[in-house]
Image (cartoon, coloured by chain):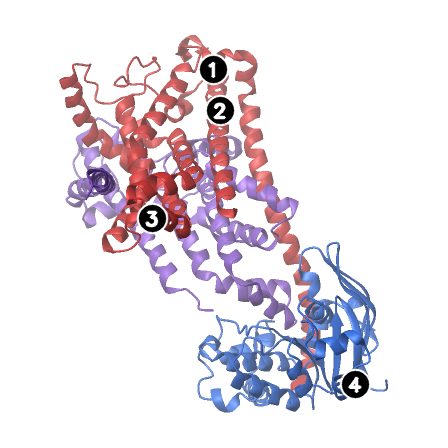
Amino acid sequence: MKPHIKYRLGKSKFFKAIVILLSTLCTVPLFLILFYILREGITRINWHFLVNLPKPVGEAGGGIANALVGSLLIVFFAALMAIPVGVMGGIYLSENKKSRLANLTRLAVDVLQGTPSIVVGIVIYFWIVKPLSTFSALSGSVALAIMMLPIVVRSTEETLKLLPASLKEAGLALGLPYQRVILRIVLPCGFSGVISGIILAVARIAGETAPLLFTAFGNPFFSTNIFKPMQSLPLLIFNYATSPYDEWHDLAWGAALILLLWVLLLNIITKITTRRWKIQF
Amino acid sequence: MMNVWKNVKIKRAFHQIRMEKFFKTSLVLIALSILILVISFLLTLVVQSMPSIKALGFGFLVGKTWDPVANVYGTYPFLLGTLLTSFLALLISIPFSFAIAIFLGEYFPRGWFSEFLKNSIELIAAVPSVIYGFWGLFVLVPLVRSLEIKLGVTPYGIGIFTSSVILAIMIIPYAASLGREMIRMVPSSLKEAAYSLGATRYEVIRAVILPYAKSGLMAGVLLSLGRALGETMAVTMVIGNTSLIPKSIFDPGNTMASVIANEFTEAASSLYLSSLIELGLVLFLVTVVINLIGKRIIKRFTTE
Amino acid sequence: MENTILKSVDFDAYFGENHVVKKVNIEIPKNNVVAVMGPSGCGKTTFLRCINRMHELIEGASTKGKMLLNNEDVYEMHPIFVRHKIGMVFQRPNPFPNLSIYDNVIAGYKLNGMKMNKADKDVIVEQSLQKAALWNEVKDSLHKKGTFLSGGQQQRLCIARAIAMEPEVLLLDEPTSALDPISTSSIEVLLQELKKNYTLIVVTHNMQQAARVSDKTAFFYLGELIEYDDTKNMFTNPQDKRTQNYITGRFS
């Protein structure tokens, strides 16, 4: 072989090696983080940890029951608001590809998707916290619903767009009314895509902290009143992690592991739904 | 037999026709309300930052001192902090993102390791930012501190550099997954043409694949940048939160997002609050514009 | 004509500026099979889709003129009623993939939200599948998904689904073009059975098929109805030069 060609092949191999090395390196910090959270968190998690309230500074032990319930409630109400609006919005966009309103709405959804989460918190502070003159779980849910909305709209639109037009035509040609064709044929056929978009969106907002800082605010006590401040897992982690007390750090590690597991679980469910519920055409 | 049902069918249809109108109207109303939501979102930010815009004008963006006690609101330190952390993060993450994009898009599109890598990248995007911040605070900060001692700079541990590293990890998936898709879209006929001329794999990647996927890769970088600019929690936890202008990348500082997160609920005077909102408005406009440009590029690339 | 069921009067159809069906006047007699043929792009499918108002679903599409079903203009009725009276079968079989065979047949009722008892549903399903000559093949697997059937069976399922609604007219848009020869011939035999109860309008680009299955044939060319006659006359003694060219294969 000529030395020139040898040089070129060598360069090619070298490049490939670099690519493989860098790609593999990327997984290192991820697994360091997962490992560290698991190591620090696992020793703190037990039944006591899940059902008790945090103890005041200086006392060891305590749990995160208020944050767990708070997170579930805040995320639940956020989903309750975002899912119907998001799915209907996605239906509108997939059904009206070229209308002026559709283009503007699509732009609006893109804007929302690019909005930093902290800014959402600011706006909801003025929409809900100030008028009610109290921080509240409800305002936190609205903020998270706004974070969720673009993901649900987009995934619904993309899913429904890919369904063959013949499906809709078959329904309409039977004399079925439009809403039945959409809700009973088109939506069920795109079910896996729509549902995985929703779960992904829930996973996204479950870990959000910034929009809750000025809305749900956090609460060291147990509360299920959505018109009052409420604790949530990410808020608890943030507040306790940045505190100077070791006992609180311990709680935060445990909470971090729970949050991580919950987000991972949602992501895995997303994967499974996309794979299993594919409808054959 | 069927005729019995015919009458029911007709009665039913009148009801359905009314429902059809209702359904179509509600679809339009919902699309409209999403639009109105976003417009009022922007208006709220503008209206609430008016006091600060009026009182401070352009000095807001160039003023070098942020001292709420003295009622002085110059945001230059935060703009600098945001730009420094974001671009440093981008600089660190791009080689990794592109490596993954090429790895999954060209070298190994299939196989268990590729699946593993792909899932890992998705996982990086899924981990909540508060967890990155927490980990950074307890693991990365001590590491950076010992590095700083070796380098002979003040060993804060926290600061611009630490934030950039955390951000770099967090934004890898954005450019990586988009880049992978774009590289996959390179027509194989182009690649084969280059191979048939005797090009090596590397030469094909450099001369055919990267130029073809250039704009797509660029869009991925923009989306990463948008994410980095707006990221709040992880940065807030490790940047040090000082309003002084950072002299080096190892100094503590503040970004636009972190200063809002830290000071919003404490802002007592209305001008203080308003200037924080104006900061939010600037952040909003910058990230949205960057995101929209990125999306435009993707759209043009994929419909070609 | 005495027993005309469907009649179009100066009917035009457009895609935006594009004039695709031009001043078509045609009368369809009851209980006949009428074939609509012509080279691709001649407007035959568009015309068919105008009859049950499917054409207007496409963005920018519009129509002009009258389409009379039993002397009533379908363009003055609500599309839902029109489509109850005029069923349609498409080029590619399109059973609902989320429904079983049973539910596919009854889809027009079920998805409408009509409450029916099981016995009535059973009767409709069996009768419709019988008429579509599919009953014997699927009676033991009614609760399997319709998409597991072969192409020809799927198409017959779609026919059963359409006739379950008891339409007066059945439109078939190249119903066999996606099927193999054996399935094609079974559908063609079925059409002869169906015309006892329904009026069938079949779009086809296959001349032999038109000759085999239809009582009357319409020839479309560049959006115009060139010739419309009894099938036998049309193929043995075409009046128009263009029809003659088409039949003898001089263009397609």
Q: Are marks 3 and 1 on the same chain?
A: yes
Tag 3: amino acid? Tyr
**At numbered mark 4, what does the secondary structure look like: helix, strand or loop?**
loop
Q: Are marks 2 and 1 in contact (CB under 8 Å)?
A: yes
Q: Which secondary structure, mark 1?
A: helix
| Res A136 → quadrant | top left
Chain of the residue displaying label 3: B
Q: Amino acid at mark 1?
A: Leu
At numbered mark 2, what does the secondary structure look like: helix, strand or loop?
helix
Image coordinates for residue B39, horizontal then vertical, percent: 59, 35
Q: Is residue A243 above or below residue C74?
A: above
Chain-order first, disc 3 or disc 1: 1
**Disc 2 is attached to a residue of which chain?**
B
Q: Report the residue marked by disc 2.
A: B282
Residue C16 point in image, percent of width and height: 73, 54
The answer to whether the residues at label 3 and label 1 have Cβ atoms under 8 Å apart is: no
Residue at x 61% of width, y 62% of height: A179
- The mark lying in front, picked from 3 and 1, is 3
Chain identifier matching the blue colour in the rendered picture: C
> Colour in which chain A is shown?
purple
Q: Which residue is mark 3?
A: B195
- Identify the subunit bearing mark 4: C
The residues bearing labels 3 and 2 have C-alpha atoms spaced at a distance of 49 Å
The alpha-carbon separation of the residues under discs 3 and 4 comes to 61 Å
A275 or A41: which is nearer to us? A275
In depth, the one of B214 and B194 nearer the eye is B194
| Res B61 label | 1
